[in-house]
Amino acid sequence: MTLLSVSELRGGYAVADEIVKGATLHVDAGEIVALIGPNGAGKSTLLKLIAGLLRPRSGQVRLRDRDIEGLDAPAISRLGIAFVPQERNVFGAMTVAENLEMGGYLDAGHLRRRRDELYDRFPMLADKRRAAARTLSGGQRQILAMAIALMNAPTLLLLDEPTAGLSPQAAEDLFGTVVALNRSGVAILMVEQNALEALAISTRAYVLVQGLAEREGRAEELASDPAVRDLFLGGKAQPMLAGHTGRH
């Protein structure tokens, strides 16, 4: 069943600043979908357009059978989409417990139960519930950021560069956390620069270039494609993308 459908989406940070230039993609229930591509391709901007942090210039975003493009971020969050930004994704001066309370403000009636469920899922957060978020390691802060998003029981989690700045071991651990979340029933659309590692845990993936989804396919197929591997191991994108219009 299609959970999220994005069609011909365009937008950016200003009226004349079109970074996403007609992107089309979908996420089915139960999937992890990776969104990969060169720096400056518009990947993070696309997530912000879906999440309601930026207003699309044109195009359609549907969650199940409902059009959501143009709704603001709180409204989209209430409908079941949670966004975890790459930076400034926790309140550093607040404790872990207070961060989770902030995440649950949209549904305060279930705050305590959901917080306790997250403590069970992430024992580290329970152990550090009284610690200031700024004292956590990079990997621990990313887990807290995801837990904040999970406080509203989303059906779709948008992750923007979740392993950015982490050590290889912390990144590997975080990818394991993403897989575990997905197995618990949360669909995930993930922007990630560690492209080959992201493909290893994903169902499908899109390659975004200059604001367009230029390639799409099963994650294992893209991971084994020599052109894709060249792109993300230091090769040039041009041979892969020349004349290609995507499979939409």
Image (cartoon, helix red, strand yellow):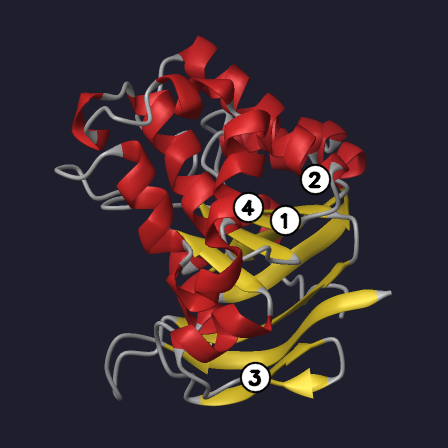
Quadrant position of residue 86: top left
* 183 left or right, relative to 17: right
| Image x and y of residue 5, in percent | 69, 73
Query: Which residue is tagged 4?
Result: 113
Disc number for residue 182: 2
Q: Amino acid at mark 2?
A: Asn
Whether the residues at callouts 1 and 2 have beta carbons within 8 Å, the answer is yes
The residue mark sitting in front, 2 or 4, is 4
- Relative depth, front residue between 38 and 96: 96
Q: Amino acid at mark 3?
A: Ile
* 168 left or right, relative to 4: left
Mark 1 → mark 4, Cα distance in angstroms: 23 Å
- Counting residues from the start of the chain, the first of labels 2 and 4 encountered is 4
Q: Residue furthest right?
A: 1
Instruction: Count up the numbered dots.
Output: 4
Mark 4: few, some, or many residues within 10 Å (few <14, many ≥20)?
A: few
Q: Secondary structure at mark 4?
A: helix
Q: Secondary structure at mark 2?
A: helix
* 65 left or right, relative to 115: right
Q: Residue at x 60, y 57 (%)?
A: 154
Query: Which residue is tagged 3?
Result: 68
Query: Which residue is tagged 1?
Result: 188
Mark 3 → mark 4, Cα distance in angstroms: 28 Å
Q: Residue at x 60, y 62 (%)?
A: 213
- Relative depth, front residue between 68 and 224: 68
Whether the residues at callouts 3 and 4 have beta carbons within 8 Å, the answer is no
